[in-house]
Each structure stands twice: as structure tokens, then as C-alpha cells.
Amino acid sequence: MNKSLTRSIGFWLLLVLSVASAAVGGWIISGQIGTMTSTLTDGTATGVEVYVGQSLVVVGAALLGAGVLGILLAVALTAVRALIPTAAPVVVEPIDWTAENDTSIDETPATTDAPTAEPVADADVEPTPAAEAETATTR
């Protein structure tokens, strides 16, 4: 896998969605906490502002936590990718077709002038008694 991390759509999707989630979560939390604080100190707080506000703060905290976790995951992926060594690129040099052939290498085919000897059965040699006994038992 020689694909660069910065060219990965999944990496950028993780990073952008994590930042967006953290931003939306922080915005929800700050808005609801601000509203609850001002209405509770004024004495004009209603049940909707207090109880629904608490639920929205929990939802905002979950979004903020997921966003921060995603950002940390993206940073960890970047660190791990930096530690993995990349393969050295293969360099292919172009062939110089205009150069003359190198004549230092002997390109003549190897030939053997010696005739090949075929095995010849000796008709003059008589078999030994052990060889006769061996051939008699195999027949």
C-alpha cells in the first residue's frame, strides 16, 4: 500500500467530520449552558429550558467527545504512517539505442568438436559366474 495518507479520501473524511462534530458539539454546549445560566440566575427559567437544556448539553458533549476522538485518531494515523518506511522507488533508465554493442562479451556460440562416444557392449568379455547366476535367477 504505497498510497499517501494525505491523498486518502477516508483520512480527509475522518478529519473533516471530526472537526465538524467537535464544533457542533461545542456550539450546542455553549449555547445551552449560556441559556441555562442566564435564566437560572434571573429566576425566569422554565422547565423546558432546564430539563431539555440538560439533555441537549449531553448530546453536545457526545458530539464534542466523538469529534475530539476522531481528531486524535487522525493524528495517530499520521504518526503511524510517518513511522512506516516507504519502499524505495524503482528507477528504470532508458535504453540508449544509438550506442554500439559492447564487443567485450564473446557472443559466439559454444561448439564442441569432440565426437560423442556411444557405449559399446564388449562381446569379447565373458560374464563372471556370479553374473550368470544372477541372470539365471531373474529369468
Image (cartoon, rainbow, N blue to C red):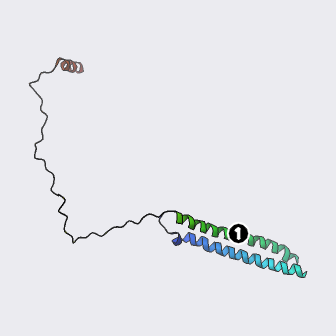
Q: How many marks?
A: 1
User: What residue lies at 60% left-to-right and 70% top-to-bottom?
Assistant: 14
Q: Is residue 44 visible?
A: no
Quarter of the image containing the C terminus? top left
Image coordinates for residue 62, horizontal then vertical, percent:
73, 69
Q: Residue at x 80, y 77 (%)?
A: 33
Mark 1 lies on residue: 65
The residue type indicated by label 1 comes to Gly
Q: Is residue 38 left or right of residue 97?
A: right
**Residue 69 falls in image quadrant:** bottom right
Q: Residues within 10 Å of mark 1 (few under 14, many from 20)?
A: some
Residue visible at 13% across and 47% down in the picture? 112
Residue under the point 22% across and 20% down = 134
Q: Nearer the viewer, residue 104 or 66?
A: 104
Tell whether 108 sits left or right of 8: left
Left or right: 42 as drawn, with respect to 94: right
Q: Quadrant of residue 108?
A: bottom left
- Check the image and name the residue furthest to the left: 124
Q: Would you place residue 110 above or below residue 99 in this image?
A: above
Q: Position of residue 5 (x, y in %)?
A: 53, 69
Pinpoint residue 104: horizontal percent, then vertical percent: 18, 61
**Would you identify the image quadrant in which residue 37 lies?**
bottom right
108 above or below 12? above
Please tell me whether mark 1 sits on a helix, a strand or a loop. helix
Residue 20 versus residue 130 in the image, above or below? below
Q: Which of the pair 32/73 is nearer the observer?
A: 73
Q: Is residue 19 visible?
A: yes
Residue 120 coordinates in the image, percent (x, y):
12, 32
